[in-house]
Image: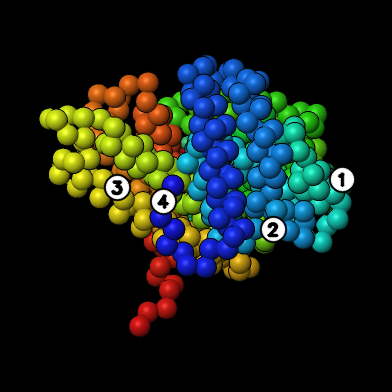
Amino acid sequence: MYMELTPDLSGEHEQIKETVHAFAKEVLRPAARTLDSIPAEQVADHPGFRNALRQAYEMNLHTILVPEGFGGMGLDPLGTHIVLEELAWGSAGFAISIAVSQFPAFGACLLATDNEELIAEFTTPFVENRDGSLIGCWAITEPDHGSDWLTFGGMEGDPGEGIVPNLRAKKVDGGWVLNGQKAAWISNGPVAHHAYLFLNLDPLKGMRGSGIALVDLGSPGVSRGKAWEKLGQRALPQGELYFDDVFVPDENLIANPELYPFAIDATLSIANTAMSALFTGVAQAAFDEAFRHAKERVQGGRALIEHSTVQVSLFEMFKTVEAARALSRRVMVYNYQTITPSLKHAVAAKVFCTDAAVKVAHMAIQVFGGMGVSKESDIEMIFRDARMAQIEDGVNEALAINAGHSLQFMEGE
Ligand SMILES: Cc1cc2nc3c(=O)[nH]c(=O)nc-3n(C[C@H](O)[C@H](O)[C@H](O)COP(=O)(O)OP(=O)(O)OC[C@H]3O[C@@H](n4cnc5c(N)ncnc54)[C@H](O)[C@@H]3O)c2cc1C
């Protein structure tokens, strides 16, 4: 466990850090190792996946993003950071699964605060669930539209108007009928019951005609594709969602095109801030692995850690992890207690921390030598898990296009 530099850490913070770290070490990491080596199709029903998720729900970890007034755990932003970081220390895949599961429950609180029926359908049963049997997902990416969702407002000439999402909603009496599909990358797609679903309401407006709906994935017309084989985060089930004449009532549309700019900014701010905390945890995990190995392994008659090249490598890794934690904590403390979170800071933290996780895991493999590329070690899984994050929740370059564009509107000296 790392040395704590935040002076005002409370007893509650210390306790949750210790508890979640132990859970990550004893439950999530071993389960992730098991799921890492089985076919993707088998993950969703594997007892290793279901048991770990059930234990996370029993500990109430599935409610950390939900506001306390709606039944969430009630952690402050620093506590939330600590929990996300520790979960991902154990397993990036499980941590993502637990975090995205909250999106429909959290989305109802964010965009339909006063709608008691939606809260009763999407938030209350979820926060009260204790056996991991109610799972959510966030579905934005489509086969033809990945970075389009992020970059359309961030390029000259606003080409968003000519780009129309695959998933279309057509107005009918009392609601909307959905047709189209979401990509194989939807985290929890194969197991989710509810979706925080991005869709197009007005094709003539392109991406600017988008909205968000809360959708029960048990509705007639919803089907799923097969889970994809992938490089890392293999404990996280991911797969396509298909919508074939799926009826969604009017009240489930929680963001129309007028509200959409606020809704996507708020969603990306929350998600990218969470990603920065998660991948600080992955960077720490990689450092911890390298540090432990460097103390145990003897070469040239001395422990690796006594060799200056290894010391310099470990220092570079240590410095990178500390910088990631300093930035992500700072951004989370700001973004998770304001109604207008800063997207550019969230993106800066997501890009920095995911790059940091890849860099530290990459360097850790070098400290391990041959053992670093062996399936016998955790570090090669951690490296593969980290690499996914430079694409996950927005390719880092696409996020940079969007955030970079917004810098021109920032006040200067
Ligand atoms: C582990 C993981 C988890 C994920 N979880 C979810 C999830 O829960 N829900 C969900 O909806 N999605 C999820 N995704 C999808 C993810 O958000 C997309 O993969 C991502 O947005 C990139 O889209 P794409 O794969 O279509 O790549 P593309 O958009 O095709 O990008 C390919 C390359 O082209 C570049 N590029 C694209 N557009 C531009 C442009 N305008 N200008 C310059 N360069 C450009 C990009 O930078 C990138 O290098 C997940 C992905 C991963 C890997």
Question: Are dots 2 and 1 in contact, CB under 8 Å?
Answer: no
User: Can you identify the residue that label 3 sits on?
Assistant: 317
Q: Earlier in the sequence, mark 1 or mark 3?
A: 1
Helix or strand or loop: what does disc 3 sit on? helix
Which of the numbered marks, if any, corresponds to residue 173? 1
Q: What is the CA distance from the residue labelled 4 to the residue labelled 3?
A: 13 Å
User: Can you identify the residue that label 2 sits on?
Assistant: 74
Q: Residues within 10 Å of mark 1 (few under 14, many from 20)?
A: few
Task: Single out the mark in the foreground, 4 or 2.
Answer: 4
Q: Residues within 10 Å of mark 3 (few under 14, many from 20)?
A: many
Helix or strand or loop: what does disc 4 sit on? loop
Q: Earlier in the sequence, mark 4 or mark 2?
A: 4
* Residue 191 at least partly seen: yes
Q: Is residue 81 left or right of residue 300?
A: right
Q: Earlier in the sequence, mark 1 or mark 4?
A: 4
Question: Are dots 1 and 4 in contact, CB under 8 Å?
Answer: no
User: Can you identify the residue that label 4 sits on?
Assistant: 2
Give the percent coordinates (x, y) of residue 365.
29, 33
Q: Amino acid at mark 2?
A: Gly
Q: Earlier in the sequence, mark 4 or mark 3?
A: 4
Q: What is the CA distance from the residue labelled 2 to the residue labelled 1?
A: 39 Å
Q: What is the CA distance from the residue labelled 1 to the residue labelled 3?
A: 58 Å
